[in-house]
Image (spheres, grey):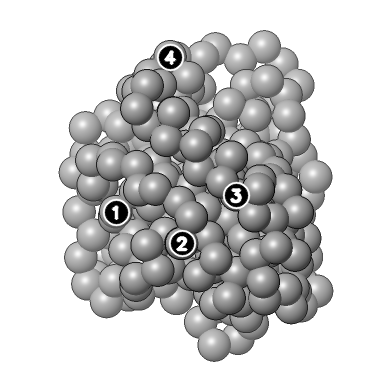
Amino acid sequence: MVKESYYVDKSVCTKESFADLVTVTDQAVEKMIIDSLTQKYPTHKFIGEESVSEGKKCDWTDDPTWIIDPIDGTANFVHSISNNCVCIGLSVNRKIVVGVVYLPITDQMYTAVKGQGAFCNDKRISVSKVSDLKNAMVYTEAGNSRQPEAVLTKIENMKNIVFASHGIRCLGSAAVNMCMIAQGSGDAYIEYGIHIWDIAASGIIVEEAGGVLMDPSGSEVDFLSRGVLCASTPGVAAGISKIIKPVEFERD
Ligand code: IPD
């Protein structure tokens, strides 16, 4: 569905800001995933980006829950940039146990199951060995909020990271950025403003590839807190935590 609609004109609507985009394809893909999983697992719960934006509560319980972003990198999809992906994570007792991130345009499938390693198109992947921020390539994003204070703090954080590292990269999708860390194409990713559906599937892929996943402050990851930091090693993560300022977003 994503591939078919990628090459045609998209009908675009906005959500929380004029840069927070949704298309009929996001909604149709989410419905298709929920409908097919419900047939197989009728008692399981769902958290889906578009269902939440249409008013469903983001209720994360201990029950088996599928956490879905039908298109992560919707702005890329709208602008015909191939870094967009379908993200599906499964949590049990609020721990992520399975993650799948699929880039339909480039046909790359990243997968992880708790305790079984991380893969891209069935080939095992692992994080880099970089342990010092000054030798690291860091992914981050401006995000899609246009609240002046949030944007300016993010730009300040980007400036601090540039001065402390090999540079920054922005691929326009939280999950694609995290898969880059998982496969060793860069060493850290930090963002405030993301949601649980942006990071659930890719989070376990980073961990199973040997990386670390945490809150940007350095404390334990909180999937509902709207902030995430992942890195190849604790050393790189600590270097970033030290130089960034928090950006406040309402919890999921
Ligand atoms: C967005 C992308 C983007 C990130 C935003 C996310 P969406 O997800 O991951 O890279 O900067 O914070 O909301 O809206 O395309 O699913």
Q: Earlier in the sequence, mark 3 or mark 4?
A: 4
Q: Residue furthest front?
A: 163
Which mark is drawn over residue 4? Answer: none
Q: Distance between the residues labelled 3 and 1?
A: 22 Å
Whether residue 125 is visible to the viewer of this picture, yes or no, is: yes
Mark linked to residue 18: 4
Q: Position of 208 compared to 95: left or right?
A: right
Q: Distance between the residues labelled 3 and 4?
A: 27 Å
Most foreground residue, 90 or 155? 155
Mark before the other along the chain sequence, 4 or 1: 4
Q: Do the residues labelled 4 and 2 touch (CB within 8 Å)?
A: no
User: Which residue corresponds to mark 2?
Assistant: 242
Does mark 3's beta carbon lie closer than 8 Å to ligand 1? Answer: no
Residue 225 numbered mark, or none: 1
Q: Quadrant of residue 59?
A: bottom left
The residue identified by callout 3 is: 161
Measure the alpha-carbon separation of dots 2 and 3: 10 Å
Name the one closer to the observer, 206 or 7.
206
Mark 4–mark 1 distance (CA, rounded to whole Å):
23 Å
